[in-house]
């Protein structure tokens, strides 16, 4: 099949209104699901798989369904509030299996002798301290005897020390709102749907036509082939999907 050059050759389901609900009503979770649907089709086509159920669902008129809200159940309602004793129980179990990781669980003995301490909710504690593994680093917080400035400065010193000792650098912050805005401003959904559909038909769409039908007048042919295509391939990668998913949990 020759390259598609005319608007009349495009599928009837492709309209600007198809993407309005995603841009204006979709939650971050729904956006992630929509991107995942396209990533799956992209992988299928890369493997030469045609006429799959996922492709049939994507290449049709799509209506964004209202997001389902999780309803409370017995399990959710019976979840206990996290307290100090829970943390110490976990530490004890880790010590049994990995004795070199936590050399001492004396805090557990202390907790058993001080019931009020052991069963107070973790978020209500005004004082908390722990030794980091086998290192000499001891992290402690005392809200009653320390100013916010002292706590901030002390924690910053601890962070610098422990990052240096462990070699763990600060992760690059994933700016989800900026990424999502980029997805919409670069018409990523429109580009993906048209190019994936064309691939499923064993053909391609000219950049001139794409520039005409994707936000008419906004992109040049070169911007379609460089800028839009670049961002489209990025957002359907597994790495992007994983970072996006982690930021909406």
Image (tube, rainbow, N blue to C red):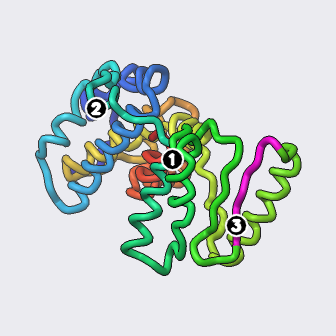
Q: What residue range appears in magenta? A: 137-144
Q: CA distance from mark 2 to mark 1?
A: 45 Å
Q: Which residue is mark 3?
A: 138
Left or right: residue 95 compared with residue 139: left
Q: Which residue appears at 63% of the width and 67% of the height?
A: 131
Residue 231 against residue 172 in the figure, above or below: above
The image position of residue 185, as x and y in percent, is 56, 35
Residue 51 against residue 49 in the figure, above or below: above
Of mark 2 and mark 1, the one earlier in the sequence is 2
Q: Main secondary structure of the magenta part?
A: strand
Left or right: residue 62 compared with residue 221: left
Q: Does 69 lie within the magenta span?
A: no
Per the image, label 2 sits on a secondary structure element best described as: helix
Q: Does 143 lie within the magenta span?
A: yes
Q: Which residue appears at 33% of the width and 36% of the height?
A: 6
> Residue 228: which numbered mark, if any?
1
Left or right: residue 139 compared with residue 171: right
Q: Residues within 10 Å of mark 2 (few under 14, many from 20)?
A: few
Q: Is residue 98 visible to us here?
A: yes
The image position of residue 230, as x and y in percent, is 50, 54
Residue extending farthest front: 113
Q: CA distance from mark 1 to mark 3?
A: 50 Å
Depth check, mark 2 against mark 1: the one in front is 2
Per the image, label 1 sits on a secondary structure element best described as: helix
Depth check, mark 2 against mark 3: the one in front is 3
The quarter in which the C terminus is drawn is top left
């Amino acid at each position: 099949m020759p390259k598609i050059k005319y608007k009349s050759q495009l599928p009837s389901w492709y309209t600007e209104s198809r993407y309005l609900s995603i841009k204006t009503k979709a939650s971050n979770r729904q956006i992630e699901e929509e991107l995942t649907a396209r990533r799956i089709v992209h992988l299928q086509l890369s493997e030469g798989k045609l006429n799959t159920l996922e492709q049939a669902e994507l290449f049709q008129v799509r209506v964004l369904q209202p997001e389902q809200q999780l309803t409370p159940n017995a399990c959710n309602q019976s979840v206990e509030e996290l307290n100090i004793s829970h943390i110490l129980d976990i530490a004890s179990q880790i010590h049994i299996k990995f004795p070199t990781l936590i050399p001492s669980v004396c805090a557990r003995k202390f907790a058993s002798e001080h019931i009020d301490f052991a069963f107070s909710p973790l978020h209500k504690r005004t004082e908390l301290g722990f030794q980091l593994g086998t290192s000499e680093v001891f992290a402690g917080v005392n809200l009653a005897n320390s100013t916010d400035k002292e706590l901030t400065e002390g924690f910053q010193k601890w962070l610098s020390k422990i990052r240096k000792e462990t070699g763990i650098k600060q992760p690059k912050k994933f700016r989800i709102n900026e990424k999502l805005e980029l997805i919409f401003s670069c018409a990523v959904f429109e580009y993906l749907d048209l190019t994936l559909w064309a691939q499923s038909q064993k053909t391609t769409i000219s950049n001139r036509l794409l520039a005409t039908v994707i936000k008419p007048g906004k992109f040049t042919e070169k911007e379609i082939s460089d800028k839009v295509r670049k961002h489209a391939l990025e957002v359907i990668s597994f790495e992007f999907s994983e970072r996006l998913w982690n930021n909406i949990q």
